Amino acid sequence: MQIAFAASECVPFAKTGGLADVSGALPSALAAEGCEVKVFMPLYGSINTINHGLTFARELYDIPVQIGGETIYYHVWYKKNGAGVEHYFIDCPRYYHRASIYTNDGDEDKRYILLQNAVFQILQRYNWAPDILHGNDWQTALLPVYLREKYNWDSLFWKTASVLSIHNLAYQGAFSKESIYHAGLFYDKYYPMGPYEFHNAFSFLKAGLVYADAITTVSETYAHEIQTPEYGARLDGVLRMRHDDFYGILNGIDPNEWSPAADKFIPQHYGFETFADKAKNKKALLDYVGLPLRENVPVIGMISRLAAQKGLEIISQAFPELMQMPLQFVFLGTGEQKYEDFLKWAAHTYPEKVAVYLGFNNELAHLITAGSDMYLMPSRYEPCGLNQMYSLNYGTVPIVRKTGGLADTVHDYHEFNQQGNGFSFWDYTPYALFTSIQRALALFYQKDAWLEVVQRGMSEDFSWQKSARKYLEVYQRAKSKRG
Ligand code: ADP
């Protein structure tokens, strides 16, 4: 099967969150299943072409795209990875050399309109007909729309089916209706409740959800949740309408990057048989962040974008009570000011118990995952979540709110079932969070029972291969609609 996959971020080139992990790993896993995959993304100013070994594609030089009243030109860079996946980077400094990957600039819509047109134009120049065109989140959600409304004249794409994946429904790409003109589409589909209209705006994501042959999201529970008004971010109605073509597929994790036996960033490798060795990572972590090592005091780690979604509210409300317990916290994150302020306050007020690193630090993320005893993820909603899966495989017992992918991967331990691989709670309240941490702490001191929980987590299989096969099934179903 031939697959054209587009995304706004992709590991190892550019990353702000889980989408980059998926775009980095899924195409390679699909290639291992025998697919031919081309990945398309912007060449952001932060991507160093030399360090990443990219080649300038001479045959794709100075390609024009009409965006609204302007003609924009771009070049293309290229790289084939070890799994045989071909990456194409859209080079347009005027759009992509900005201080960050995403911006609030007035031309944010145009930046991704360019990317999506480039996907079609490059495929045309190579005369390469994909079976599947796979878009991800709002930045590439117009691909299904383009397939039917803009590039439908080209017989190259007549058998191509589209798939759109939602990695986080909260980000919808809503722009003024002029954006329809920028995109090269027509206003005839912009009317109340029409395909392009969404609360008096043009939403890339809504339009994509209406047009895609199949829709996926990154866990089964999130797929159910976002069809309800509570979690649906106003798109629940559209998703209910597309119910028959909507699938939840859990993300996998990359064992080359995230496994305690092979992790490049931790001082001591370990497995369940050598679990005692994990203590060396704990020592290294505490040294790194400047906390004292305390016998029998568990360290709780957290690595997160500091956004409302991630549960910082209930952590801060429960914090003074949590500080009464024998535990230490290590936080790594960056994001909204008010959460950064809370974390600074916490580290300042409890210097022996709390360490905070504000920023993006992949090496420290690995050390926290390996060196902590427990991992905290009390998200208000969580499409899939990766850190709880890493933590499970690292024997770092997760404490999570039972939502989205967290509900699908972390199974609550309690003394009556003697099963479970972590702790979870449902109510989004500081009290529920506090009680779960209390339960985890109580079990931490019952070493045998604790090790059983650890062992169950470490033996969970979150391989991408399992997920890739499910995507292939969805691709087949989408394709069968196009004959
Ligand atoms: P989201 O996509 O909502 O941010 P996920 O759990 O799906 O959440 O993915 C987050 C990814 O980003 C994980 O790989 C996590 O380790 C990483 N990450 C988040 N914040 C940081 C940070 N400050 N430093 C290093 N890695 C981070």
Image (tube, rainbow, N blue to C red):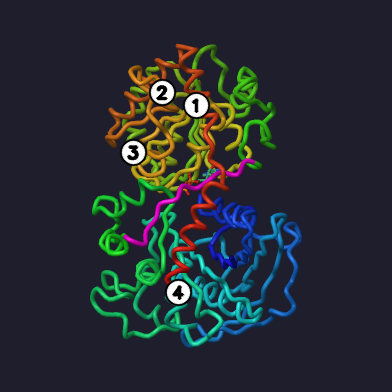
Gap in angstroms between the C-alphas marked 4 and 2 = 45 Å
Q: Which numbered disc flags the more N-terminal residue, 3 or 2?
A: 3
Crowding at mark 2 (Cα within 10 Å: few <14, some 14-19, many 20+): some
Q: Which numbered disc flags the more N-terminal residue, 4 or 3?
A: 3
Q: Which mark is residue 419?
A: 2
Q: Which residues are magenta?
A: 244-255
Gap in angstroms between the C-alphas marked 4 and 3 = 47 Å
In the image, what residue type sits under mark 2?
Gln
Q: Residue at x 48, y 27 (%)?
A: 397
Crowding at mark 4 (Cα within 10 Å: few <14, some 14-19, many 20+): few
Crowding at mark 3 (Cα within 10 Å: few <14, some 14-19, many 20+): many
Q: Which numbered disc flags the more N-terminal residue, 4 or 2?
A: 2
Q: Which residue is mark 1?
A: 456
Q: Is residue 286 magenta?
A: no
- Residue 427 location in percent, x, y? 27, 35
Gap in angstroms between the C-alphas marked 1 and 2 = 8 Å
Along the line of sight, which residue is nearer the eye, 13 or 120?
Answer: 120
Q: Is mark 1 within 8 Å of ligand 1?
A: no
Crowding at mark 1 (Cα within 10 Å: few <14, some 14-19, many 20+): some
Q: Which residue is mark 4?
A: 482
Q: Which numbered disc flags the more N-terminal residue, 1 or 3?
A: 3
Q: Residue at x 44, y 63 (%)?
A: 477
Q: Which numbered disc flags the more N-terminal residue, 1 or 4?
A: 1
| Quadrant of the image occupied by residue 312 | top left
- Position above or below: 446 against 98: above
Along the line of sight, which residue is nearer the eye, 12 or 417?
Answer: 417
Q: Are marks 1 and 2 in contact (CB under 8 Å)?
A: yes
Q: Which residue is mark 3?
A: 313
Q: How many numbered discs, if any?
A: 4
